[in-house]
Image (tube, coloured by chain):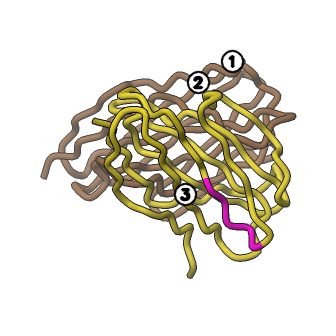
Chain colours: A yellow, B brown
Amino acid sequence: AAGVIQSPRHLIKEKRETATLKCYPIPRHDTVYWYQQGPGQDPQFLISFYEKMQSDKGSIPDRFSAQQFSDYHSELNMSSLELGDSALYFCASSLQGVAGELFFGEGSRLTVL
Amino acid sequence: KQEVTQIPAALSVPEGENLVLNCSFTDSAIYNLQWFRQDPGKGLTSLLLIQSSQREQTSGRLNASLDKSSGRSTLYIAASQPGDSATYLCAPRVAGRRALTFGSGTRLQVQP
């Protein structure tokens, strides 16, 4: 069965640079979520999209932005990167709105030097 | 704001034991609750989803119960195996929000 696909899997950037992460949800899933997990931390919700519209916002820094495109893939854009942005970034998708089970991708590991 | 607590934070047991992992949450107005496992540096694998109208869900050796009114969920793992070693996370979905709120997890080590 198709899973959530994230790219790139690993990314190394310098401080103040920009990074873009991509997420391809499970086909026909209507909601996409982005989470950030720092070392030894639990996943923190950043932002979600339902049917390509932003549906919920968590602790996403102003330096970050995200969008969902017409083909339902989503991108997380991160600018002015800081050392503290080094983390695993997960994308998840679900179907049936609030009742649906979330399925996570393998994550994109961002290292900021 | 939903606060999720998982007890114990870490657990080390010999193979074959039956285990109980506890999760409590402060806001009982939830749509559902999901249990995940996470291997080090890896993604989150969904184990069970319990809707707010359900009392329990079972999948193989795993059984999860939900007591919404008291803000508690329990994950039972029967006949534990070394392959069960991972961090287990519970995540309720608060009414009015689509996103899950995660606890800090229980880090499980099953000794062969």
Q: Secondary structure at mark 2?
A: strand
Relative to residue A96, is residue B92 drawn left or right? left
Q: Amino acid at mark 1?
A: Thr
| Spatial separation of the CA atoms under disc 1 and disc 2 | 7 Å
Front residue of A99 and A19: A19
The type of residue carrying mark 3 is: Phe
Q: Which residue is mark 2?
A: B4
- The foreground one among A79 and B107 is A79
Instruction: Tell me if label 3 and label 2 are in contact, CB under 8 Å.
Output: no
Q: Is residue A36 above or below residue A103?
A: above
Image quadrant occupied by the N terminus of chain B: top right
Q: CA distance from mark 3 to mark 1?
A: 25 Å
Are the two marked residues, 1 and 2, in contact with CB atoms closer than 8 angstroms?
yes
Residue visible at 60% across and 49% down in the picture: A76
Q: Amino acid at mark 2?
A: Val
- Residue at 39% over, 49% down: B38
Residue nearest the viewer, comparing B112 with B108: B108
Q: Residues within 10 Å of mark 1 (few under 14, many from 20)?
A: few
The residue identified by callout 3 is A104
Expressed as whole percent of the image width and height from the top left, the position of residue A93 reads 66, 59
Residue B5 shows in the view = yes
Residue A34 locus on image (x, y percent): 61, 46
Crowding at label 3, few (<14), some or many (≥20) Cα neighbours within 10 Å? many
- In which quadrant of the rendered view does residue B26 lie? top right
Output the chain of dot 2: B
**What chain does mark 1 sit on?**
B
Q: What's drawn in magenta, residue-wise?
A: A71-75
Residue at 79% across / 63% down in the picture?
A30
Q: Please name the residue that numbered disc 1 is placed on.
A: B26
